[in-house]
Image: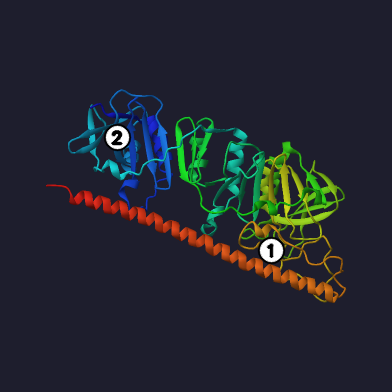
């Protein structure tokens, strides 16, 4: 039988991609293996899986020989590849004693034996009928940006992915959020019948996969597939209902101040922000944006008890009311890296109203911070803070998104040094009760997501145990 030839030049990057879905802590030995197969047409493909995700790569050129399937440990292939020259190849062959890997050894061929694994042990790769949906570069870019904004908190599992919202057939949205900031992009209309939640994974951000031609999408109600020219990624969708992210988006008409930055100088501005002094580098990395007399100023300081250092931003156009607002600088830099060159400040009075960074169909909503300090109210010998100055304590958004991006000010129209009327005090109490109820609902939602994650882990353990039982039964049936 003709062995399967694996050129080292193609095998090295292939193993890197396949390794991104292999779980080294899995108790199932088969999940540490790579499925190497040659089809009847001569095409050679390699597949790895962790039960929930499958990655397959096809080699560039077909080869001669009959159809053949062999399982080889991933780490064994990696070790042999490290010790081979780029121009060499590994040969996968079968013998009565099991598979072997042959490699160049001086003028001869060396052999490395492979532990035999029954073919039935490897999980079956899902198949998708129908036509694939092309994903243009702009859509792929939005998917990556949404992934970068998604949560990594396991208790918010439904937010650990990119949401393709297909509820509006004429305008699909790409969404990602972690509760502190939210990204969305529209102007897409895909032939999808249902919304899709793509789990975030290192493989989708891997350079080799992104440089392998146009992406194409297939999806059903439980599984999603993204493929390129030679690579194919299949994953179970994230189960659950994605939160109503639209309620976190402020009305653009309510913005009181607009800042327009020079798109050609966003990279330089990002470097300037990174050089600004920072008094809380381990926590919020606070930076301020001040709009004053038609000019944009960046605010930073080295220590908490120092005055703010103000640095003007050239070529920034400011329209609307004067304002002062603070936010995490990493989110400001991220918005600039995305090319979101317009900043809309919704309120100069409500100091926890979100900021909106936007450019055409893409936008990012960010929860602001308070500047610093422990007290939020001035003491008896201090003057009240200006109406557009945020209080002096960092604001932690409530736990579950997207609720943290929806906050409500207390009753307006009463000066800080005037007593409130009984009606206004009653309104404040109702708002406080509502916030407590929202917090309770949020905790219930977190508990529900946690239980779903536990249930998912239990199902995975049950599948692994079933596979172990099958293996034991096959071993018991062997005759010596």
Give 173 or 28, whichever is nearer the viewer.
173
- The x, y position of residue 176, in whole percent, is 61, 49
- The x, y position of residue 382, in whole percent, is 83, 72
Residue 23 against residue 284 in the figure, above or below: above
Identify which residue is drawn at 31% across, 46% down.
30
Is residue 381 visible in the rendered image? The answer is no
| C-beta proximity under 8 Å, tags 2 and 1 | no
Q: Quarter of the image holding residue 412? A: bottom right
- Secondary element under disc 2, as helix, strand or loop, is strand
Residue 197 against residue 438 in the figure, above or below: above
- The x, y position of residue 454, in whole percent, is 45, 60
- Secondary element under disc 1, as helix, strand or loop, is loop
Residue 379 against residue 127 in the figure, above or below: below
- Residue 395 bears which disc, if any? 1
Residue 39 against residue 361 in the figure, above or below: above
Q: Quadrant of the N terminus?
A: top left
Read off the residue under disc 2: 69
């Amino acid at each position: 039988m003709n062995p399967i030839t694996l050129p080292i030049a193609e095998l090295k990057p292939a193993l890197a991609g396949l390794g991104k879905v292999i779980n080294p802590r899995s108790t199932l030995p088969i999940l540490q293996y790579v499925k190497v197969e040659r089809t009847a047409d001569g095409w050679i493909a390699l597949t790895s899986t962790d039960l929930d995700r499958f990655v397959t790569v096809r080699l560039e050129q077909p080869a001669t020989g009959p159809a053949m399937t062999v399982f080889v440990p991933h780490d064994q292939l990696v070790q042999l590849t490290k010790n081979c020259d780029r121009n060499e190849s590994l040969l996968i062959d079968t013998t009565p004693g099991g598979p072997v890997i042959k490699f160049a050894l001086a003028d001869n061929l060396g052999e490395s034996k492979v532990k035999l694994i029954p073919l039935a042990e490897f999980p079956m790769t899902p198949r998708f009928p129908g036509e694939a949906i092309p994903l243009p570069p702009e859509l792929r870019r939005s998917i990556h940006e949404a992934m970068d904004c998604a949560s990594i908190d396991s208790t918010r599992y439904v937010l650990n992915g990119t949401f393709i919202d297909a509820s509006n057939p004429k305008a699909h949205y790409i969404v990602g959020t972690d509760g502190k900031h939210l990204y969305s992009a529209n102007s897409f209309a895909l032939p999808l019948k249902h919304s899709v939640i793509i789990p975030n994974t290192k493989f989708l951000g891997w350079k080799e996969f992104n440089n392998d031609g146009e992406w194409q999408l297939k999806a059903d109600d439980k599984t999603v597939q993204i493929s390129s020219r030679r690579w194919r990624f299949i994953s179970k969708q994230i189960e659950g209902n994605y939160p109503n992210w639209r309620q976190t988006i402020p009305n653009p008409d309510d913005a009181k101040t607009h800042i327009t930055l020079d798109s050609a100088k966003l990279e330089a501005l990002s470097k300037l922000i990174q050089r600004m002094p920072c008094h809380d580098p381990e926590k919020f990395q606070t930076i301020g944006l001040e709009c004053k007399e038609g000019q944009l100023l960046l605010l930073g300081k080295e220590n908490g008890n120092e005055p703010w250092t103000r640095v003007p931003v050239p070529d920034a156009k400011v329209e609307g009311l004067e304002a002062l607002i603070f936010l995490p600088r990493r989110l400001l830099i991220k918005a600039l890296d995305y090319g979101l060159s317009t900043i809309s400040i919704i309120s100069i009075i409500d100091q926890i109203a979100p900021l909106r960074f936007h450019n055409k169909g893409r936008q990012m909503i960010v929860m602001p911070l308070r500047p610093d300090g422990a007290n939020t109210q001035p003491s008896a010998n201090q003057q009240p803070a200006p109406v557009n100055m945020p209080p002096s304590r960092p604001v932690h958004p409530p736990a579950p998104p997207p609720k943290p991006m929806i906050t409500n000010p207390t009753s307006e129209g009463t000066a800080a040094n005037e007593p409130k009327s009984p009606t206004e005090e009653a309104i404040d109490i109702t708002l406080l009760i509502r916030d407590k109820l929202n917090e309770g609902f949020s905790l219930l939602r977190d508990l529900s997501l946690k239980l779903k994650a536990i249930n998912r882990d239990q199902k995975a353990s049950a599948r692994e145990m079933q596979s172990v039982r099958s293996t034991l039964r096959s071993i018991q049936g062997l005759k010596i």
